[in-house]
Image: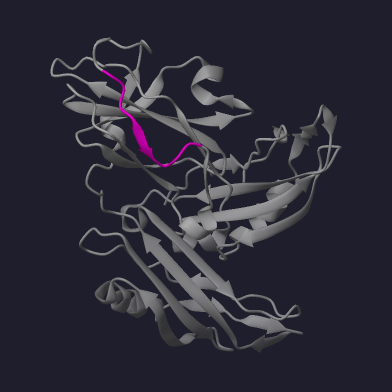
Amino acid sequence: MAASVPVLLFAQTWSARPPRVIFRSEPEYSEEARRAGVNATINVSLVVGEDGVPRDIRIVRGAGFGLDEVAARTISSWRFEPGTKEGKPFPAPTHVDLHFSVLDKPHHGQTARLNFSLPADVSRPELLEGEIPSNPEIPADSFLRVRLTVGPVGQPMRFQTLDTNNQDWTEHALLEMAGWRFRPAMRDGSPEEVTGVFELATSQSVPENRPTLTRAKTISPPEAQDATLPAPQPISPPDHAIFDGYFDGYPRRVTCKWEPSPGAVSYILEWDYMDREAWHTESQGIPGSAYPVAATETTFDFVGAQPGRWRVWPVNARGQRGNPSPWRTFRYVN
């Protein structure tokens, strides 16, 4: 089993320059998560002090399997260039997303979490045997939430399905989970019965008109090739839209719609993100990335809790780009 290097994403604000990491150690999988084949995203809140040292580190949305402890310990070792407001350093609240992904096919596209309700003096159970349930046999976007109890001997029991959109897959998952074995929760050296909730989501299907990376294009040169082809008019999301990953869900998917452009036979959606107060393509001096679209609507997965922008190019029958729409900006706050 191989593990990819976690992707690090930082929240940013419009009104002040956010902190910038100047030293970081890369988090590694906990052995528990590696054994189980866990894909997870952990959201961490922290305050970067005027001295660039992180404090008040808090796991906002954890994943369990020992990864929460890894995330907190790793971020505590980072150092930042402090955020500034009106040119002066200030204690800056921010969020960091740590992404952990295994590369094996049975768990591709998954996000898993196992969180227990524990008193302060009780340690969490550790999964010693068993893996995360494999994906559905028929590719589909599926999810499940299951309550379970881990007894004093480390055996899971009393499974209760709280929510699912794929009952057959959930039943297979429960059969796999019945074979799990834990090091039990402990209180003062004695095993303790505890209850937790396991969540698993998998994204395997590709919705109609949703771009794929194999279809990526570059916008170079960044000028219209057919100046007679008018710019499409954006419809949604509105300019300066604000989304919240907690409430709108993960992954952060943005659906863009626009009016048809007379003479266009297809379109190219271009999008970008802000990095250190500059648009990524501009700061790096690279061509914009974009995706061909046959219709006047498409969806893409955005990179993180930060500002983004999008625009649309019309394309004529000869494959030439027309005039692009104006950029529209948006922002994910979580």
Q: Give the x, y percent position of residue 240.
A: 52, 38
Q: Is residue 233 left or right of residue 330?
A: left
| Residue occupying image coordinates x 44% and y 59% | 111
Return the residue nearer the eye: 177 or 119. Answer: 119
Q: Which residues are magenta?
A: 230-239
Q: Give the x, y percent position of residue 196.
A: 55, 79
In the image, residue 264 above or below residue 109: above
Return the residue nearer the eye: 118 or 96. Answer: 96
Quadrant in which residue 259 is drawn: top left
Return the residue nearer the eye: 141 or 93. Answer: 93
Q: Give the x, y percent position of residue 232.
A: 30, 27
* 227 is within the stretch colored magenta: no
Quadrant in which residue 117 is drawn: bottom right
| Residue occupying image coordinates x 38% and y 25% | 289
In the image, residue 47 above or below residue 326: below
Q: Is residue 42 left or right of residue 107?
A: right
Quadrant in which residue 318 is drawn: top left
| Residue occupying image coordinates x 69% and y 48% | 74
Magenta stretch: dominant secondary structure? loop
